[in-house]
Image: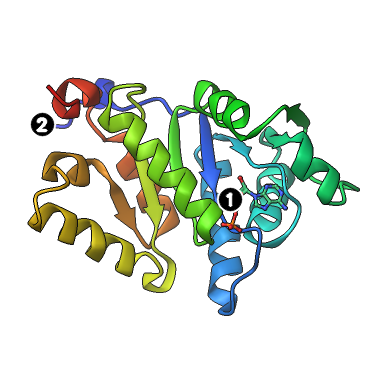
Amino acid sequence: MNDVTALRKINTLCVFCGSSEGNDPAYLQSAEQFGLAMVKSGMDLVYGGGGKGIMGRLAATVKAGSRRVTGIIPTRIHEMVKHIGHDEDELIIVGDMHERKAAMYARADAFVALPGGIGTLEEVMEALTWLQLGYHDKPVGLLDTAGFFSHLTAFLSHMIDEGFLRSVLFDTLTVDSDPMRLIERLQRVPLDLPAKIAHP
Ligand code: AMP
């Protein structure tokens, strides 16, 4: 039986993604498709506040669909990048990366990474680590465009095989190449996550 009441309400999604475009046009296309899926699902966006690459395309798409876009950016990065005509409804400038993450985590109901570089990797792995430790109970997902995250998921599987990662945490990581299906699957992640995965 489908228990619709058990669906997670994801009003605000925090998305980590590349400040670059990547070499394959599929990455930008899928950022746009993911933005459209967010709009269709009635989700607002919290992200790093950049106007370039995958970040910029995603923010522009969500904003064009009339959903709220909040950028959270540390002073240092804000000073480094040009902020003209960007797509945020609100740009929150914070002191440092720690403050930025705390602000992102507080606002979001779930986290997703789109293809990106080490910034994206660090952010999504931290979101997963905080889930493991019970600091939040929000699901984490990967948009696996063109198999981009297959090396990462293979490495996480290796960690399980070698006894460094609990498979119950890996099982909560939602990986999908289809934007709408990824969103729908995140909404179905069990509500009692911390109880299931927190370390004893
Ligand atoms: P990367 O994946 O290395 O391109 O880094 C992307 C992540 O790092 C984003 O999710 C942002 O949080 C942060 N970041 C990197 N570059 C920028 C930028 N130009 N403006 C805002 N945030 C950025």
Q: Nearer the viewer, residue 91 or 126?
A: 126
Q: Dot 1: within a 10 Å radius of its alpha carbon, few (fewer than 14), some, or many (20 or more) residues?
A: many
Would residue 135 be visible to someone looking at this image? yes
Q: Amino acid at mark 1?
A: Gly
Is residue 23 rendered to the left or right of residue 122?
right
Q: Quadrant of the C terminus?
A: top left
Q: Nearer the viewer, residue 45 or 92?
A: 92
Q: Earlier in the sequence, mark 2 or mark 1?
A: 2
Q: Is residue 52 above or below residue 189?
A: below
Q: Amino acid at mark 2?
A: Met
| Picture coordinates of residue 165, whole percent (x, y) | 17, 46
Q: Which residue is mark 1?
A: 35
Residue 33 location, quadrant: bottom right
Q: Which residue is mark 2?
A: 1
Residue 27 location, quadrant: bottom right
Q: Residue at x 71, y 37 (%)?
A: 73
Tell me if label 2 and label 1 are in contact, CB under 8 Å.
Answer: no
Q: Which numbered disc covers residue 21?
A: none
Could you tell me which secondary element the residue under label 1 belongs to?
helix
Q: Residue at x 35, y 21 (%)?
A: 135
Could you tell me which secondary element the residue under label 2 belongs to?
loop
